[in-house]
Amino acid sequence: MAYDKFNILKSSCVPLPIENVDTDQIIPARFLKATERVGFGENLFRDWRFNSDNSPKEDFVLNNKKYKGKILVGGKNFGSGSSREHAAWAIYDYGFRCVISSFFADIFRANCLNIGVLPVQVSPEFLEKLFNQIYENPETEIEVDLTTQKVSITEQKISERFEINSYKKENMLNGYDDIDYLMNIKDSIKEFSKSTPL
């Protein structure tokens, strides 16, 4: 399989309430030399995480030990800018399996879905409640249920549905990329080709 199956994710969150986070901030261009998906996590948000002498910036959220988990909660218009796949690779390689925002750039959303990171778009009102809850209690558990397409703040007993393309949903539930999907239906493809005249 291309990546782990995604069904229900229960995790604490890392809050990043910055709007218009672009792909160059997610993974700066100077780190795009590799063509495999591994190793990009160490440079996720590199210029926001580290000073020029490679010392950690104490005020950046990824360097704050009280925030952790597999869910990154971002501000509006997350993943804007260039179409580099490496931005999604860096998020996955760092350990995030879901990004929640009130709006995603289309290409970034597609890149995430292609590698097993679930982009969950919620209303601005729900996003604000989510940030407030995380700041009040950094150990807050969020449940993201792909099967029902629902994200829940368990402590507040509130939830909201999210949309996802049915094909991409099926792939994520099975851990398939596009090639895995085709390989899984290869017998059907063969039968179709036999019954369809050239």
Image (cartoon, grey):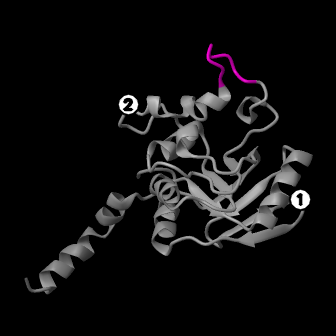
Real-space Cα separation, disc 2 to disc 1, in angstroms:
43 Å
The residue positioned 64% from the left and 62% from the top of the image is: 103
Q: Which residue is drawn at 75% across and 71% down?
A: 160
Residue at 75 percent across and 48 percent down: it is 17
Which quadrant of the figure has residue 188? bottom left
Query: Is residue 81 highlighted in magenta?
Result: no
Q: In this view, does 49 lie to the left or right of 178?
A: right
Quadrant including the C terminus: bottom left
Q: In this view, does 32 lie above or below 1?
A: above
Residue tagged 2: 33
Q: Residue furthest top?
A: 53
Residue at point 46%, 42% (across, down): 86
For marks 2 and 1 on the same chain, the one whose residue lies earlier in the sequence: 2
Q: What numbered label is drawn on residue 36?
A: none
Residue closest to the eye, 103 or 136: 103
Residue indicated by mark 1: 155
Q: Which residue lies furthest to the left in this view?
A: 198
Residue 127 or residue 197, whichever sits in front: 127
Query: Label 1 crowding class (10 Å Cα cut-off): few <14, some 14-19, many 20+?
Result: few
In percent of width and height, residue 193 lies at 16, 78
Is disc 2 surrounded by few (<14), some (14 to 19) or many (20+) residues within 10 Å? few
Residue 56: x and y in percent read 70, 21
Residue 12 higher or lower than 7, as above or below: above
Specify whether 8 is left or right of 109.
right
Image vertical order of residue 56 relative to residue 17, above or below = above
Q: What element carries label 1?
A: loop
Q: Give the range drawn in magenta.
A: 50-57
- Residue 52 in the magenta stretch? The answer is yes
